[in-house]
Amino acid sequence: MTLAEHIVAKSATVGIVGLGYVGLPLAVNLARAGYCVTGIDVSREKVAAINCGESYIQDVAAERVSEQVQAGRLHATADYDGAGELDIIFICVPTPYNESKAPDISYIQSAARSIAAHLRRGQLIVLQSTTYPGTTEEDVLPILESSGLKAGQDFCLAFSPERVDPGNRTFTVENTPKVVGGLTPQCAELTRLLLSSLSAPVIVVSSPRVAEMTKLLENTFRAVNIAMVNEMALLCERMGIDLWEVIQAAASKPFGFMPFSPGPGPGGHCIPVDPHYLAWKARQYDFSTRFIELAAAVNEAMPYHVVSLVGDALNTQRKALKGAKVLVLGVAFKKNIDDARESPARRVIEGLLKEGAEVIYNDPHIPRFSIGGDAIYPTQAMLASQPLDAATVAAQDCLVILAGHSAYDYAWLVRTARLIVDAVDATRGVEGRTGKVVRLGAPL
Ligand SMILES: NC(=O)c1ccc[n+]([C@@H]2O[C@H](COP(=O)([O-])OP(=O)(O)OC[C@H]3O[C@@H](n4cnc5c(N)ncnc54)[C@H](O)[C@@H]3O)[C@@H](O)[C@H]2O)c1
């Protein structure tokens, strides 16, 4: 049987390298579609959790994992010894940036080297990690070909970006269309065939570079629009206009407008990171991506703006930031998720501490939160989420809402707190907020 026939018959075996926010949902969904899936992760804790039928990712229910483990369609391992027996291998490892915001593709390179050691004829390798255009052909391909096999001839190679949106219940891996770019038409077709089993449409583009650029266009689009609306927020504060009301009104236009919300700045593994991958690659072509640089500058300034808003809010009550008791609500990078990577809360808390405030935080999704350890705030600390009881709330000089989790009772918070800075308009519609809540993007 050919690989295409194996894919159609669901007898193809699939490996997922990197069982994180992207890899685990993909592994579970391919297992649910009927494939035998092996997850490979360097984290022994994650491997043990999967094999026990547990989930460590909020969007993946533990029952979904245990169901597939018990059915024998999903198992995990920390070594690559069996990689040669797999028909298809997805690479879903992290792509962070370093301290100078240059791409760090070392995880991709390491995964590719481990796969190359076991590569055999007829396999399909698909890179899913978000990265700059050219990575699949310029970085992954030579590592895989160091095995002596030829890409596009002996084995297939493709890029297919992940579009998972943590916390989004409407659009999941199952119903979000996928984009695929293969080294050859056959590489693309085999990837399309497999991903079609997840039921969402698959769009095939002409090359891995087009697919890589597609993902970066999507994320840069978000970063630039968020920056634009963040700049509007600063202007509206100065002009005494409520931007939240403006956005609602503008969103009534059925064409040509898409609402974006201002806030303390974007976070997560994608929006603050991915555009820098493109900016870095563009410099190799003597090209300066001005929108990306400008958007990053505006977005990265937002946590500092929140710190000054807290100072302004306390000032209205004749209080100083120095010595003030401040409770930060929500350190996840957005509402209702358990991911705090690149969260703007970090810079907000560090900024408040620098100004001499006494800061604690609460987040039902993030039990521990680490700050410091870099040039901006060298002192490292691991903070723990504090209980959100009436005594704690009433004892604070100011509450700062950074992620508008649905778990919070905003009416109760407004009644109980002395003062609130709301960076995400989470208190919208709550009675009695006027005079007590200072909102980002609205008159003081
Ligand atoms: N998180 C998201 O919402 C999201 C959305 C779309 C795309 N992406 C992209 O997907 C990629 C993965 O992101 P993530 O959020 O899933 O990361 P993650 O950190 O949650 O998971 C990555 C996993 O890879 C494992 N790993 C690292 N090196 C390895 C190696 N050599 N071999 C095997 N396992 C290894 C890690 O232990 C970890 O479990 C990134 O490129 C990211 O930009 C993420």
Image (spheres, helix red, strand yellow):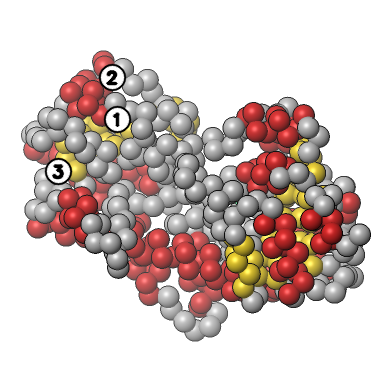
Hey, which quadrant is residue 210 in on the image? Answer: bottom right
Say which element carries label 3. helix
> x%, y% of residue 261?
30, 52
Residue ID for mark 2: 392
Residue at image point 37% right, 72% down: 291
In contact (CB < 8 Å): disc 2 and disc 1: yes
| Residue that badge 1 annotates | 327
Amino acid type, residue under disc 1 in the picture: Leu
The numbered mark, 2 or 3, whose residue comes first in the sequence reads 3
Q: Which residue is mark 3?
A: 312
Marks 1 and 3: CB-CB under 8 Å? Answer: no
Q: CA distance from mark 1 to mark 3?
A: 16 Å
> Residue 327, position in %: x, y?
29, 30
Q: Residue at x 48, y 42 (%)?
A: 169
| Front residue of this view, candidates 89 and 399 | 89
Q: Does the Cβ of the disc 1 residue fall within 8 Å of ligand 1?
A: no
The answer to whether residue 281 is above or below residue 255 is: below
Q: How many marks?
A: 3
Q: Nearer the viewer, residue 396 or 151?
A: 151
Q: Mark 2 to mark 3: distance in Å? A: 22 Å
